[in-house]
Amino acid sequence: MSAHTHVDGQLPHEPEKATLEGRNKVLGFWLFLGGETVLFGTLFAAFLALRNQVGDGNPTSQELFDLGLVGLATFILLTSSLTSVFSIQAMHKNQVKPMLIWLAVTVLLGASFLGLEIYEFFHYVHMGHGYTTSAFSSSFYTLVGFHGAHVAFGVTWITILIFQVLKKGLNTVTAPKLYVAGMYWHFIDVVWVFIFTVVYLMGKVA
Amino acid sequence: MMNRWHVMKRLMPLLAMMSLLLAACGREDLSTLNPQGPVAEQQFGLMKLSISIMVLVVVVVFVIAIYVLIRFRRKPGDNRIPVQVEGNHKLEIIWTVIPLILLVILGVPTVKTVFGLAKDYSNDENAIQVKVTAHQYWWEFEYPGYGVKTAQEMVVPANAIISIEAKTADVLHSFWIPALAGKIDTNPGGNVNRMYFEANKPGVYYGKCAELCGPSHAYMDFKVKAVDEASFQRWVTAMKAPAELPADPAIAEKFVNECLTCHAIGDKGGQLYPNLTGMGDKVAVAGFLINTDNPLYANEGSAYENLKRWIADPQEVKPGNSMPKVNLTEQEIDAIAKYLSEQKLDY
Amino acid sequence: MAHGHTVKRYSGLMDWLTTVDHKKIGILYLIAGGFFFLLGGLEAILIRLQLWKPLNDFVSPDTYNELLTMHGTTMIFLAAMPLLFALMNAIVPLQIGARDVAFPFVNALGFWTFFFGGVLLNVSWFTGGAPDAGWTSYVPLASTTYSQNHGVDYYVLGLQISGIGSLIGGINFLVTIINMRAPGMSFMRMPMFTWTAFITSALILFAFPALTVGLAALMFDRLFSANFFEVANGGNVVLWEHIFWIFGHPEVYILILPAFGIISEVISTFARKRLFGYSSMVFATMLIGFLGFMVWAHHMFTTGLGPIANSLFSIATMLIAVPTGIKIFNWLFTMWGGSIRFTAANLFAVGFVPTFVMGGVTGVMLAAAPADFQYHDSYFVVAHFHYVIVGGLVMGIFAGLHYWWPKMFGRILNEGLGKLTFWTFFIGFHLTFFVQHFLGLLGMQRRIYTYQDGLDFNLMNLISTVGAILMGIGTIVFLVNVVVTWAKPKNAANDPWEDGRTLEWSIPSPAPEYNFVQTPLVRGYDALWKEKMDGNKGMTPAEPIGPIHMPSPSILPFVMSLGLFVTGLGLMYNFVFAGIGLLITFGCMFLRSVFDDHGFHIEPEELQDKGVKA
């Protein structure tokens, strides 16, 4: 069961699932995301347990968080999820060039998100909210930082895939990779929605 | 080939051991099977209930297993294919429902006892409040209602509720007096725990640290000394009385400078380390060196000998504990040990 | 892309370093797991030698704490789990009629990360101190304030790396079992061992990430001065306990469920009877897996969670006894009316049943929270978990090894030596641990370096030590058996026990590289037995003979894991090395992504050769 680029010259509909390897990759990735859900769930639990341990004299979440900036970052990340949907739609229609363009936009938006987050962290450190400041700060940076690391990994991964498709073309070997990268991207977007709500919104209001 | 002889060969050592061991319920001052107070008694009651149910289960399983292994073993030359049985709904329901019933029989008393033993006596005027602080590797006992602080030996009146508030000053430890009550962990920071116990009669009960806390975890014993009410009151008074320093002024000066920077005795000294008041009466030095005039074992000796041994090299007795080798000559250690071994409270 | 691929074949050491074949990976897990089992066993013997008499000083208190920590950590993570993975790898693809697992490359990666994680953990013995805060590594003892040397760092990093291997293995088996069963093998026709492998893999997937977070948090506290568990800065040590046990409790079900599967196979085969109540067995396994996530705080009854929490967790814990009891009765009634043959494998399986029941009932006793206030952190708990882990899991592994040895190696282990192994190990086991119940009840705490004289502990501790030595002898007998058997010719039949019921017995012993010449057609539960009862010689094929596509070997899993090993050392000693290690690992991931593996083909003409060159 090796990979065929074309059967009768056509890319199969849903090329990511056209081979056993492809189906295995997609299922395996869903399961991996299940495990990642538990991972982030545990990080959230730790954050919730420690979020009130700010320590005397240290900035509180109300003082630190700027919902405008965070809202902009959220908008950017959510949009990047949308553009990744467009790229997979193009893939299913065998439209390689639009697919690659949407992937590139996704990467750019992801990189912008990261840029904003790095700026945000620098600002916090300047305000006296460092990694080692308190239990609140350690759990905040670990949770949000793990998410940021996931975004960074995703940006790198999708970039490498763009170059792979440029070189090898879209076929039943590259299609599953693109599909699971899309799943990954949606996942970190969903995690961000929870971070925005639990860390920033609840932190600003409570 | 498995036959009756092999089965007995397997069970005999277990049966022999069990009869040997169940014969002794253990020491009155240490065993959970020989409770000396109402809390340990209730816990022992649950133990008895659960083990009865479980012995029943084990016996049923063993009987079926032994029967099956003997009755259905393959005899030489027997090549038949047995009837293949998919299951039996009736049996499966029986061995689901009966265990569930057994669990209800165990579960209801369990929940009742959980709540019963969770009663908080910290505001009860008839209870004696004791604040327990665990350290690496000693136990601090403070009686806020009486203004008394002591270490390693908790003197309490028998037949009274002792309400405990437990925490640690460093790592996790666990406060356990097996003969009187189950244990409670000592947590740092805000996670202070409460429990209570009562001793039915006067006696000295073993206390143990039950959470791995470092190299000297095994040496972190303490004692609970239950006495009658009058004796307890005398103890409180004696604990608060001013202490006499050593008669010899040179030794007294050494004692104040080398010892009382950290330790307290009577109304003098530092509060951070074990209180030395009434050292001569205590059951043990450093919780582990038992004071006796008839030493039988390597950790026993007279109070004077034990104190000398301890002060000369605390790290040798309890590796990793906070007391360094102090700046005293051999004669000074001897004199201070003798002085401390004579510090007895009259109660 | 065309089918033309150069056939990349290695031999000797390189073959083993680059293999992605589940059968060879199974053997690698067996060798590494077996080695760590011996190491953990040595640590146990040293512990028992220290405790044979009161006030002993055979080792120092610090060394003792290192021994007890490493014994637990090694046995659970580096011995028990890998040995289970050995059998799962060797057998599950065969039982479902597949040619390999879903992700052969990742399978190899799983092995090498486990291996290097275990090596990293044990390097600590030579670099200033092994971890010494218990396998549970409670804080604050495990924080840098109270554990100044690198011991706990080795614990955190070694387990983190090893844990990646476990997680990978879990995902692999889930996908394999879901997607790659032979035609006709519905879920309810799968053998019990495959079912338990499946549910265990789900437990691994959902339990290990919690451990990952816990270890990361402890690592950040120790290496980067974070404050998760730093009470002075608002940290909470009970949080560690929660996170650890949310992983730790499912972990013990991860350990025991595959053993349950092995017992089902062995008892059924050697009684010549179908498993009694198969669907209840499947359902009970699922229920145990699910409930296993609901009971973690029974390890924390004395932490001070309050009566409501303690009551809920008591009841939930007691409930797990019900599906477990169902299994015990199903095994007994499988044998009822059967024709029981006492091979060494079956002795272990049959010995498992009463022993595990004893361990299980002390578990129910422990579940009663008020009583647990007495049992907790005493030798009663030590007795309980050794009964279920050693008397349960380890006996299950011995049963599985004796049973499947011919399928893995083409030779049957010597039956006489196998029976001797059983009796010495079994008697030694009961001697060691039965008395420990009483030690705990009489007031002896666990994890103590020594105990006072005159407390009535002496005789029982001595008996326990004697038993441990007997278990050591039993293990040595097994090793002798392995060596003696190695010298014998590789001539086991396809179905050497003659009563094989499942697909692995329909192919040669050892299994050929491609497992099945043709994927079989499954017509019922106990697929091979069904064919036998219908008078057929073997399985009906589900496809014509054709070229078989195989995955290519690769050195990348080995190198990636080595990279992680270097990262671990680097995080402790020199961040530049940590960077280099990560570069190596990510570099390999990059190479794997960019250079596709198209595998190679085995042509029909080559299909006559027999077995894995082991």
Image (cartoon, rainbow, N blue to C red):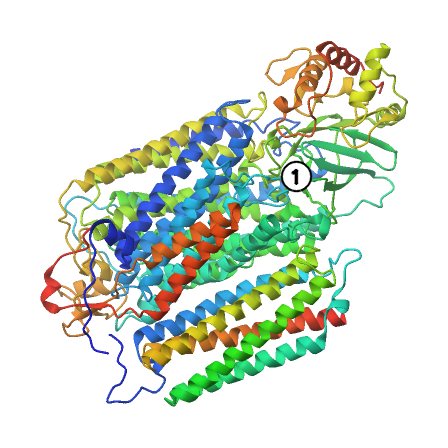
| Image quadrant where residue B154 sits | top right
> Front-most of B273 and B133?
B273
Residue in the image at 19% along x and 44% along y: B75
Secondary element type, mark 1: strand
Is any atom of residue C324 visible in this view? no
> Front-most of B86 and C167?
C167
User: Which residue is tagged 1?
Assistant: B173
Q: Position of residue C295 (x, y in %)?
A: 56, 55
| Image quadrant where residue A205 sits | bottom right
The amino acid sitting under disc 1 is: His
> Front-most of C477 and A163?
A163
Q: Position of residue B302 (x, y in %)?
A: 69, 13
Answer with left or right where residue B74 lies relative to residue A187.
left
* Chain where mark 1 sits: B
Answer with left or right where residue B327 lies relative to residue B266.
left
Residue in the image at 36% along x and 46% along y: C33
Residue in the image at 60% along x and 72% along y: A115
Q: Residues within 10 Å of mark 1 (few under 14, many from 20)?
A: many
> Front-most of C589 and C93?
C589
> Image height check: is B289 above or below A123?
above
Answer with left or right where residue C283 lies relative to residue B327.
left
Residue at the extreme front: C576
Q: Position of residue C609 (x, y in %)?
A: 12, 59
Q: Position of residue C509 (x, y in %)?
A: 18, 54
| Image quadrant where residue C34 sits | top left
